[in-house]
Image: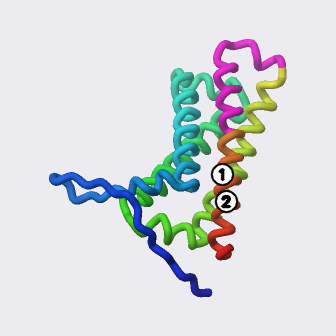
Amino acid sequence: MSHSVTITRTTTSTTNTSYIVLNTGYLKSFSGLLKLAELLIGAAMVGIFAYYQKNGACFYSMEGVVFAFLMSVTFMIGTFCLLLSCLTSLSTGGIISKTIYELIYHSVAAILLLCCSLQVVITLGDRRYRSNSQSDAYFAAGVMGLVNAVLYFISAFLAHRSYRGI
């Protein structure tokens, strides 16, 4: 299946001391804003999980926290790499959205973040886990994970439309 790729002109900024060209126009697109929002929410989740980790003791007190921590770190790093590649290249944003990689990546991220966030939220909904002070922070991280899963589902839908050429 062949695809035609159209490269549009975007706003770039360069400095005289650097050879790196930043495609700042990508952040003005809807997919660029989605990736930025996914990255920021993922960083907030990682920050909450990392802040309340005291010698690993908190991870053994509640079910699903380790899984949620691992998934939020994994997809935060992956989204950072995707966003960085689209920002540092003029043609990457238009080309990578035409491949099936974005569809698979965003679909897997949405499903795994949905699973781990639901597990954290459902576990913390039980009253016996609400006794310690960090459970509210974990509950907030679980809700942020649900929001992030919705954003990844939207990205997967857009990637599917772009891959199919719609």
Q: Residue furthest right?
A: 126
Q: Nearer the viewer, residue 30 or 114?
A: 30
In this rendering, would 150 be left or right of 49?
right
Tell me which colouring the rendered structure shows: rainbow
Q: Secondary structure at mark 1?
A: helix
The residue at the point 63 percent across, 72 percent down is 163
Q: Nearer the viewer, residue 73 or 4?
A: 4
Q: Secondary structure at mark 2?
A: helix
Q: Which residue is mark 1?
A: 152
Give the percent coordinates (x, y) of residue 80: 47, 50
The residue at the point 22 percent across, 59 percent down is 19
The quarter in which the N terminus is drawn is: bottom right
Q: Main secondary structure of the magenta part?
A: helix
Magenta span covers which residues?
A: 127-145
Q: Quadrant of residue 166?
A: bottom right
Q: Which residue is mark 2?
A: 156
In this rendering, would 16 be left or right of 121?
left
Q: Nearer the viewer, residue 78 or 50?
A: 78
Circles 2 and 1: CB distance less than 8 Å? yes
**Residues at marks 2 and 1, CA–CA distance in whole angstroms:** 6 Å
